[in-house]
Amino acid sequence: MSCGEPHETDCSEVLDHLYEFLDHEMPDGDCAKFETHIDECSPCLEKYGLEQAVKKLVKRCCGHDDVPRDLRSKVMGRIELIRSGQVDAEVDLRSALHGECGEPDRPTTAQADRPTTAEADLPTAAQD
């Protein structure tokens, strides 16, 4: 997106990093550039205001539950491992979704081809 006006910082860059700006997770120098851009650019100011309002609404509606300390430390530990490159984020996510959530493991091909006890007791068409 672009408003068509020349800016030191392009609209697309501002929108790509809008959540970092809203969450105060960017360097001070970048924050100053973004503040200047948002002050000058009506479409980006509108998007900023909308996202800020959504964040406030979510905080008001969902911000009352305390996160257990052990869960927070586990999540932060995983984030640090992923950032350091010791763990592949995609593999870690898949293992968390399939292995650690209490879901049964998928059967191997050999297990899937083997009939269950109930299936083995059923008459086949050739036996009829």
Image (spheres, rainbow, N blue to C red):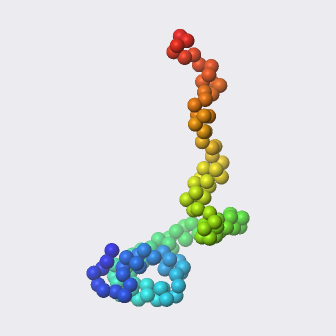
Q: How many marks?
A: 0
Percent of width and height locating residue 118 = 63, 24
Percent of width and height locating residue 62 = 57, 66
Percent of width and height locating residue 93 = 58, 58
Q: Is residue 66 visible?
A: no
Query: Closest to the observer: 108 or 99?
Result: 108
39 up-or-down from 118: above or below? below
Query: Closest to the observer: 22 or 32?
Result: 32
- Identified at 52% across, 68% down, the residue is 58
Residue 61 position by quadrant: bottom right
Residue 116 position by quadrant: top right
Percent of width and height locating residue 45 = 38, 81
Residue most extreme to the top: 128
Residue 91 position by quadrant: bottom right
Query: Closest to the observer: 105 or 1?
Result: 105
Q: Is residue 15 visible?
A: yes
113 up-or-down from 20: above or below? above
- Identified at 60% across, 27% down, the residue is 115
Where is the N terminus found, in terms of image quarters? bottom left
Residue most extreme to the left: 4
- Identified at 62% across, 19% down, the residue is 121
